Image (spheres, coloured by chain):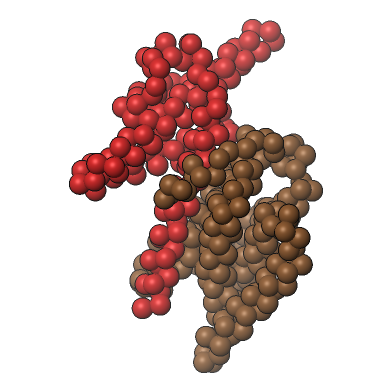
Chain colours: A brown, B red
Amino acid sequence: MCAFARHSVRRYLALNIYMLASLLVTILRYWMFSHYGFGSGEYFYFYYYSDALLTIGLYFGLINLYSHVLNELQAGQYVRLAATLLLAGTAVFSYLVVQQSSDRMLTRFVVELSQNLYFVGLVLTYLLWGAMLKMRETRTRLIQLVLSLGLYFSAFAANYALRNLYPSLHMVWGYLPPLMALSLPLAWAYAFWRVPEEARLAPARLAVIPR
Amino acid sequence: MMAALILMLSVAALLQFFVSYCRSLIAASRKQPLSEEVRDVTGIKSMTTGDDFARVVQLLHLCPERPDDRNGIQAIGAYFQLLSFLRSSIARLAPALRAWTEMERAQCAYFAAVALDRRIAFSREMFAQQMGG
């Protein structure tokens, strides 16, 4: 809505399609939750399958941000090719991890793929942020979109790692993701609504280690 | 072992993204001058200091909320807490880090003062609309 109001839908099309898909999935999840309950198999399957699809969508949103940053280098097609190969590689790796499981292999694969994509997304966002600092990117809105995406990916990657380390606390790791998931639409809404497209800032001020 | 490594890397990246994100919010507000009214209300004369933050946030809570600035204020509030923790722990041993945390805390206070300025303007607009309607 904020992107629409600020005429930024086409410029950040992949991000807006992801947000729309995310909204639809949230409505459907609520419907599943209210009909079948939090502990039901139906909700469990729907949650993880939709999460995997949304993560893939967000992955392409990230690639779209790469295209914005590397626009001047005319490297769009190489980025897309590398991203597709990386996605396929992550899927193969996830399959190799779960192939030993005899039961519910597809579900395990979906959960594993989601988990790995969050970490791959985190690494890619970190690289993008490094490139932005190196290239002295000044577009405030783009900077805020990338940083909030980095926050989102790292929070989910940390949550999955904690879940693997302490599986007995599954109630905590089950409730955290919906709360963390709120941060991305809020941060993006702020970036679209409050930060004008033409706003600029000095990127060197944002680095944790001053440059 | 692998999960522990991923956790460590994720938390390190999370902290770095969080600090950079908060600094981007602060940098965007730094260009906006404070009105005389806010300077009078908050007692900020020329430069803000970290000690102004709590007072400005208290004043912020007295104003009607603007839905679009709530998350930014919460993020900066968390960043301020992190800086205060650093200042009272590790920064005691490193004077350069202490100066940096103090400067960052002052900028958090400036961000809050700019948000207060916006909320006062927003309240005034709402009041004018009510009087007009």
Q: Is residue A171 visible?
A: no
Residue sticking out furthest to the left: B93
- Is residue A23 toward the left or the right of residue B37 in the image? right
Q: Nearer the viewer, residue A132 or B86?
A: A132
Q: Which of A137 and A89 is in front in this view?
A: A137
Q: Can residue A164 be seen in this view?
A: yes
Position of the N terminus of chain A, as image quadrant, is: top right
Q: Which residue is drawn at 48% across and 65% down?
A: A157
Residue sticking out furthest to the top: B131
Image location of residue A19, percent across then percent down: 68, 52
Question: Up-down: is A111 above or below A26?
Answer: below
Image location of residue A8, percent across then percent down: 75, 43
Image location of residue A127, percent across then percent down: 56, 62
Image location of residue A30, percent across then percent down: 61, 56
Residue A134 found in image quarter: bottom right
Q: Which residue is drawn at 31% across and 27% down?
A: B51
